[in-house]
Image (cartoon, helix red, strand yellow):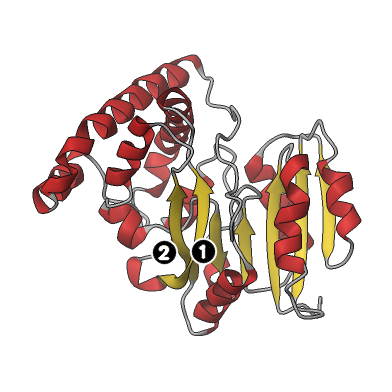
């Protein structure tokens, strides 16, 4: 049994330019023996693994030729027995205070937790900024989301499922396991950088939509299954009429992503296409 007080799982695919900075923000601020960090380099064609290994303890590195995030998550789960456990994408901007806030929420009885998500659109085009003006106000994002690259779980919470499913949508699968009163959005934030333009956002959203469609039947009966759809957008716009001018971008990008996702599913091409996000430069 590791003496660490929490474990951090990092699935990493070709993250050589950012992995050291990401790990240093956590490891350098941690107390001795506080963290057990498992980096799973999956299908990497660069030096992600070598860069991560240079950090040294408490970072451990696992390598697999399979470039598949759920495989990486399952390999990490097999390699650590420490709880609370946090699953962190390497391209999110998060500090140790936010990680500790999640751990405290789990220690206080929550089964799952995550900081509040901030989307940095400062380097994005106007349609992308407009899209996120609406997306960030949707009820699922404001109240129910545990995911988007950061989710934490207690030992009891992790017993809800055996393995991460092979067909992806790990954020949706994870958050759907827990009813709203079982998960907690802690008083801390993490950020991701939005896609720079609408074309790239459509590509990213279409991959997410397609993966979620594959997962839909599996999560429909789970306690935390999201309630989404056009009705939630209409209700939001009625409550917040100032968002109406942004609805054109939101609906246009959403429809384009759904159409592309439908074609991907028809061709059996639901695969990782590269993440458009990169961490912001400030913490």
- Alpha-carbon neighbours of circle 1 within 10 Å: few (<14), some, or many (≥20)? few
Rendering coords of residue 169 (x, y %):
50, 42
Circles 2, 1 touching at the beta carbon (< 8 Å): yes
Rendering coords of residue 196 (x, y %):
48, 32
For discs 2 and 1, the disc positioned in front in the rendered view: 2
Q: Nearer the viewer, residue 132 or 13?
A: 132
Residue 178's tag is 2
SS of the residue at dot 1?
loop
The residue at the point 76 percent across, 80 percent down is 31
Residue 205's tag is none
Q: Nearer the viewer, residue 172 or 78?
A: 172
Does the rendering let one see residue 154?
no
**Above-or-below relation of 120 to 104:** above
Rendering coords of residue 96 (x, y %):
64, 70
Q: CA distance from mark 2 to mark 1?
A: 8 Å
The residue at the point 58 percent across, 35 percent down is 275
* For residue 115, side relative to residue 181 (left or right): right
Mark 1 highlights which residue?
A: 160
**Above-or-below relation of 279 to 152:** above
- Can you tell which quarter of the image residue 65 is in? top right
* For residue 3, side relative to residue 96 (left or right): right
């Amino acid at each position: 049994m590791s003496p660490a007080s929490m474990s951090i799982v990092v699935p990493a695919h070709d993250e050589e330019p950012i992995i050291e900075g990401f790990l240093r923000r956590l490891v350098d601020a941690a107390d001795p023996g506080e963290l057990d960090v498992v980096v799973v380099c999956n299908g990497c064609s660069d030096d992600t693994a070598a860069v991560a290994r240079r950090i040294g303890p408490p970072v451990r590195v696992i390598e697999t030729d399979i470039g598949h995030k759920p495989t990486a998550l399952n390999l990490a789960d097999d390699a650590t027995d420490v709880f609370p456990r946090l699953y962190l994408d390497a391209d999110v901007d998060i500090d140790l205070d936010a990680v500790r806030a999640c751990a405290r929420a789990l220690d206080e009885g929550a089964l799952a937790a995550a900081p509040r998500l901030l989307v940095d659109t400062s380097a994005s085009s106007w349609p992308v900024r407009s899209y996120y003006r609406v997306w960030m106000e949707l009820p699922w994002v404001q109240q129910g989301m545990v995911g988007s690259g950061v989710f934490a779980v207690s030992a009891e919470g992790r017993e809800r499922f055996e393995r991460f499913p092979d067909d992806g949508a790990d954020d949706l699968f994870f958050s759907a396991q827990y009813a709203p009163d079982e998960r907690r959005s802690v008083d801390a934030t993490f950020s991701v950088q939005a896609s720079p333009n609408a074309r790239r956002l459509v590509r990213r959203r279409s991959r997410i939509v397609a993966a979620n469609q594959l997962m839909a039947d599996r999560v429909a009966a789970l306690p935390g299954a999201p309630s989404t759809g056009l009705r939630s957008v209409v209700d939001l716009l009625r409550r917040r009429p100032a968002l109406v001018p942004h609805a054109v971008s939101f609906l246009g990008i959403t429809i384009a992503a759904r159409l592309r996702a439908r074609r991907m599913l028809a061709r059996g091409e639901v695969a990782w296409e590269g993440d458009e996000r990169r961490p912001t430069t400030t913490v």
